[in-house]
Image: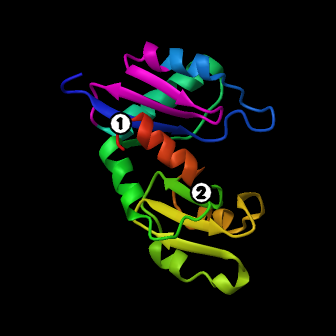
Amino acid sequence: MAGMTRHIVLLRGINVGGHRKLPMADLRALLAGLGYTDVATYIQSGNAVVAADEPDPEVVGAAVREAVHARFGFDVPVMVRTLEQFRAVVAANPLDVADPSVLMVLFCSEPVDTAGLTSIDLAAYPGERIAITPTEVFTHHECGAREAKLPAVVGRHCPGEITARNWRTVLRLLEMAGGS
């Protein structure tokens, strides 16, 4: 595996409400078919860890997106971070994590509109907090992620695409990638 780069692959909006069905066994086969090795998936929401000769996560993301479209017939946003980038995401979290199910990380495909996000009046979102980094946004939701309003607001301040994962999933993916 010398010279290989570990990547964490996050697909947005698959296996939600019976739409865009993509069994994880099929995703693993698709990723292996692209030449990635040491492929593993986590839960049914489009999380994978791979090793690739390609060091650029954007190139990996584009290849996965194109392959999913060609094989399954739907366009799905794909965010990819290298193991080092993913470690930095975890290290950058400034929010307390008493319950990992209420802390979300929103992974953005393009730089975050920091000015737009810092101008949000958080008083309009009681029980929710936000922390911003250049390519991720952390949101905390006292009433649970299902009741969260801030992720949709964040989406309006990110010029590209976003996908969210709870803190438990983020830590599990980091562990699977060999980063903890």
Front-lying residue, 117 or 169? 169
User: Circle 1 is placed at which residue position?
Assistant: 178
Q: Along the horizontal axis of the image, is 82 left or right of 75?
A: left
Decide: few, some or many residues near mark 1? Use Cα within 10 Å; few <14, some 14-19, many ≥20: few
State the SS at label 2: helix
Q: At 38% from the left edge and 64% from the top edge, which residue is drawn? A: 92
* Quarter occupied by residue 122: bottom right
Specify whether residue 79 is in view: no
Whether the magenta-drawn stretch holds residue 42 is answered as: yes
What is the CA distance from the residue labelled 1 to the residue labelled 2? 20 Å
* Quarter occupied by residue 152: bottom right
Segment colored magenta: 31-55
In the rendered image, residue 118, in percent from the top left (x then y), is placed at 51, 80
The image's mark for residue 100 is 2
Whether the magenta-drawn stretch holds residue 33 is answered as: yes
Q: Quadrant of the C terminus?
A: top left
Q: Which amino acid type corresponds to the residue marked 2 in the rendered image?
A: Pro
Point out the residue furthest to the front here. 98
In the rendered image, residue 31, in percent from the top left (x then y), is placed at 47, 21
Q: Which amino acid type corresponds to the residue marked 1 in the rendered image?
A: Gly
* Quarter occupied by residue 23: top right
N-terminal-most mark, 1 or 2: 2
Specify whether residue 76 is in view: yes
In the rendered image, residue 79, in percent from the top left (x then y), is placed at 48, 43
